[in-house]
Image: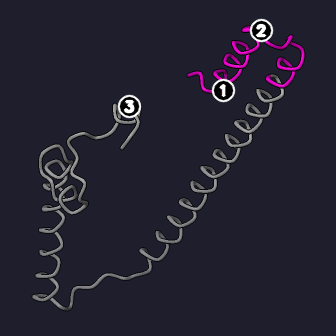
Amino acid sequence: MLSPDLEAISNRGENKFFLKTALAWKGSVTPKVLPRILVTLAYAALIVVLRSLYPELSLSITPFEYSGAVLTLLLVSRVNAGVERWWEARNIWGSIVNQSRNLAIIGYEYTPRGETIKRQYLHWVASWPSRE
């Protein structure tokens, strides 16, 4: 059972079985994507029919090889940029966690024991990294 906080953001109407969810029509993206899939299917079928009727028609594969190589380099550079951004964010988050931990230790040590301000201060420090 999910906690009350997680239950508020969970998908209440979603089926627990993958296949039923994947094949669902209501509330899914399928009605929006299906026309594009059908157009692509018709285009591919037309190419197959034309190829079988006119076998002498052909295209050189060279442009596709070059465009594939260029697309590969583009995708690799985009993935590397994304990984670098993720790594930088991870380092910044680790720094925030370490600084808040140090701040909590300092506040805990320099506050007299048994006072409610110590507990309140620790709650403030703990909530600082999770602020939006």
Mark 2 = which residue?
115
Quarter of the image where one finds residue 38: bottom left
Q: Which of label 1 and label 3 is nearer to you? A: 3
Q: Nearer the viewer, residue 90 or 83?
A: 90
Which stretch did the figure color magenta? Answer: 104-132
**For residue 57, above or below residue 125:** below
How far is disc 1 from disc 3 in space, using C-alphas?
22 Å
In the image, which disc is placed on residue 65? none
Q: Which of label 1 and label 2 is nearer to you? A: 2
Q: Amino acid at mark 2?
A: Glu
Residue 3, image x and y in percent? Answer: 41, 36
Q: Assign a secondary structure to mark 2.
A: loop
Q: Is residue 113 magenta?
A: yes
The reply to whether the C-beta atoms of the residues labelled 1 and 3 are less than 8 Å apart is no
Sequence-earlier tag: 3 or 2: 3
- Residue at point 28%, 41% (across, down): 11
Looking at the image, residue 57 sits to the left or right of residue 90; the answer is left
Q: Is residue 124 magenta?
A: yes
In the image, which disc is placed on residue 129? 1
Mark 3 = which residue?
4
Q: Assign a secondary structure to mark 1.
A: loop
Near mark 2 (Cα within 10 A), the count class, few <14, some 14-19 or many ≥20, is: few
Q: Nearer the viewer, residue 94 or 52?
A: 94
Near mark 3 (Cα within 10 A), the count class, few <14, some 14-19 or many ≥20, is: few
Residue farthest to the bottom, as pictured:
55
**For residue 125, above or below residue 60:** above
Residue 126, image x and y in percent? Answer: 68, 24
